[in-house]
Image: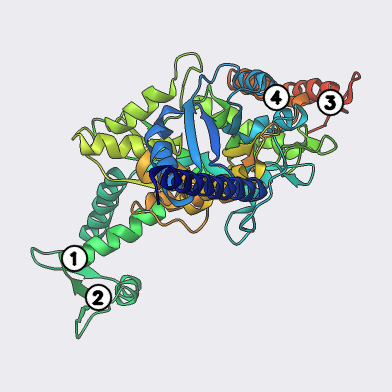
């Protein structure tokens, strides 16, 4: 075979190979086009928030979620000033839309009506009373629709200096026992009732042959002091006043009870059980009751506190109250859940030398009960989000599956019921949250809290309780009904 024939054969083979590669490439591209709509590209979701304490936690959660799902989450810290307006503007621009955002439940009606909140899909089926208290579910409900995922909360709590109460209880027990003349260097005499208590605690006592008393050790005296201390913890406002009159306070104590009486969040428990603005879900305009006899009686008790604790609403600041408690100048206070972290930080820095305890808010009296206020911060899926399925999946991952380490990483207490905490004081916060009333969502009552705060201030200053509460109710009802509203005066 000559050279020309050989070159011709090689050329033919090259053409066949090129044709084969071309057909294979076309086939592969056809397959790619065929499955293009089935295999989605990697998603990117933008998450907006305003609290910088969440930054580290959200970045960590976003990274973990990406490794699990290939869905990229971009957290963005945003100014709280005109927050919803910023979200709306970014959504309308259509570039890097905030697919999800964290917001207080009081803004959910406004967000939903603006198209910025969509009804959630609850892909894991977790939004129920098994996993969340009714307070959390009511907070994210608008017109019978769940429009967000409950995330973390803030509510009011009662905090007292346990060291002070324990020392006082021990002094009282010791004085009582010494008063019987039966105390000695090693043992103290004990009555039959006290014996029964010690036996219930599993402690041993040595019976005397010819007496109804028993000698007890110092350890057993400590148990009696613990029992006495429990009885000293105020259950009502009356108990606080009694303690203020009778308590032999340490030299460092300036006042037995102090709270920020200029802020409605710390005052609301005084009337929270007898005032309703929007019902349990805070969105029912037909369910408003502000001016009623029970609320009047509770506010009279509030007004009476001024004669015992002369606190100026113009001078008291929450941060100062917290610092006074840390310094041991205050025995008990009404605070918000953030105080626990403040106390723990102060303790770690060596600035808080006492034990403390969180317990339920005191009732107003034996007749009237208290009920605190709460705000539930929720995770919302934006109505403008292009991939609501992916957004709902991440929202439930963040609020439910990642709830276990939220407090440890951010200091926020999760709304999820089953989360376990190393600090037992948080359990009392959860109990208060479960019985609290959520801040309302209604746009017509958006100024209610400012108006109520002003009413509390006037009542504290001595103005007529009945009249001030009547004026407040008429103002709010006029806003809701759209016409002048006049309440029938309650005759006391």
- Mark found first going from the N terminus, 2 or 3: 2
State if disc 1 and disc 4 touch (CB < 8 Å): no
- Residue 448: assigned label: 4
State if disc 2 and disc 1 touch (CB < 8 Å): yes
Which quarter of the figure is the C terminus placed in?
top right
- Residue 203: assigned label: 2
Is label 1 or label 3 in front?
Answer: 3
State if disc 4 and disc 3 touch (CB < 8 Å): no
Q: Which residue is identified by label 1?
A: 219
Tag 3's secondary structure? helix
- Mark found first going from the N terminus, 1 or 2: 2
Tag 1's secondary structure? helix
Residue name at image x 55 percent, y 40 percent: 43
Mark 4 to mark 2 CA distance (whole Å): 55 Å
Tag 2's secondary structure? loop
Mark 4 to mark 1 CA distance (whole Å): 54 Å
- Mark found first going from the N terminus, 4 or 1: 1
- Mark found first going from the N terminus, 4 or 2: 2
Q: Which residue is identified by label 3?
A: 480
Residue name at image x 71 percent, y 24 percent: 446
Tag 4's secondary structure? helix
């Amino acid at each position: 075979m000559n050279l020309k024939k050989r070159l011709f054969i090689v050329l033919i083979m090259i053409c066949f190979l090129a044709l084969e590669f071309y057909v294979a490439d076309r086939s592969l591209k056809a397959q790619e086009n065929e499955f293009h709509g089935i295999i989605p590209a990697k998603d990117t979701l933008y998450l907006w928030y305003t609290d910088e304490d969440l930054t580290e936690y959200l970045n960590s959660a976003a990274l973990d979620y990406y490794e699990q799902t290939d869905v990229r989450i971009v957290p963005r810290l945003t100014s709280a000033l005109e927050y919803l307006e910023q979200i709306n503007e970014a959504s309308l621009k259509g570039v890097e839309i905030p697919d999800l955002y964290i917001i207080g439940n009081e803004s959910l009606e406004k967000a939903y009506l603006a198209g910025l909140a969509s009804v959630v899909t609850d892909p894991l089926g977790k939004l129920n009373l098994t996993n969340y208290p009714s307070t959390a579910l009511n907070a994210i409900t608008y017109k019978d629709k769940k429009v967000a995922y409950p995330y973390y909360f803030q509510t009011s709590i009662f905090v007292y200096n346990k060291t002070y109460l324990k020392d006082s209880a021990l002094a009282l027990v010791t004085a009582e026992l010494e008063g019987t003349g039966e105390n000695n260097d090693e043992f103290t005499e004990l009555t039959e009732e006290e014996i029964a208590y010690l036996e219930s605690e599993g402690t041993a006592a040595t019976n005397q042959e010819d007496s109804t008393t028993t000698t007890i050790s110092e350890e057993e005296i400590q148990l009696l002091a613990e029992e006495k201390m429990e009885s000293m913890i105020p259950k009502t406002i009356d108990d606080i006043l009694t303690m203020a009159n009778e308590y032999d306070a340490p030299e460092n104590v300036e006042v037995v009870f102090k709270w920020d009486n200029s802020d409605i969040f710390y005052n609301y428990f005084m009337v929270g059980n007898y005032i309703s603005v929007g019902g349990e879900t805070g969105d029912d305009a037909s369910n408003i009751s502000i001016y009623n006899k029970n609320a009047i009686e509770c506010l009279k008790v509030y007004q009476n506190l001024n004669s015992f604790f002369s606190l100026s609403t113009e001078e008291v600041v929450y941060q100062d109250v917290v610092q006074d408690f840390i310094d041991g100048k205050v025995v008990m206070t009404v605070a918000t859940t953030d105080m626990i972290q403040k106390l723990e930080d102060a303790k770690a820095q060596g600035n808080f030398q006492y034990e403390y305890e969180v317990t339920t808010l005191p009732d107003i009296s034996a007749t009237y009960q208290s009920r605190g206020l709460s705000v539930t911060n929720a995770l919302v899926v934006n109505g403008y989000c292009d991939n609501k399925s992916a957004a709902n999946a991440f929202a439930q991952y963040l609020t439910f599956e990642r709830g276990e380490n939220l407090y440890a990483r951010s200091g926020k207490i999760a709304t999820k019921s089953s989360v376990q905490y190393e600090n037992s004081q948080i359990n009392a916060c959860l109990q208060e949250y479960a019985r609290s009333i959520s801040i309302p969502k209604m746009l017509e009552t958006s100024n209610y809290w400012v108006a109520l705060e002003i009413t509390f201030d006037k009542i504290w200053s001595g103005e007529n309780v009945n009249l001030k509460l009547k004026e407040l109710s008429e103002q709010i009802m006029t806003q809701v009904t759209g016409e002048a509203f006049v309440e029938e005066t309650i005759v006391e």
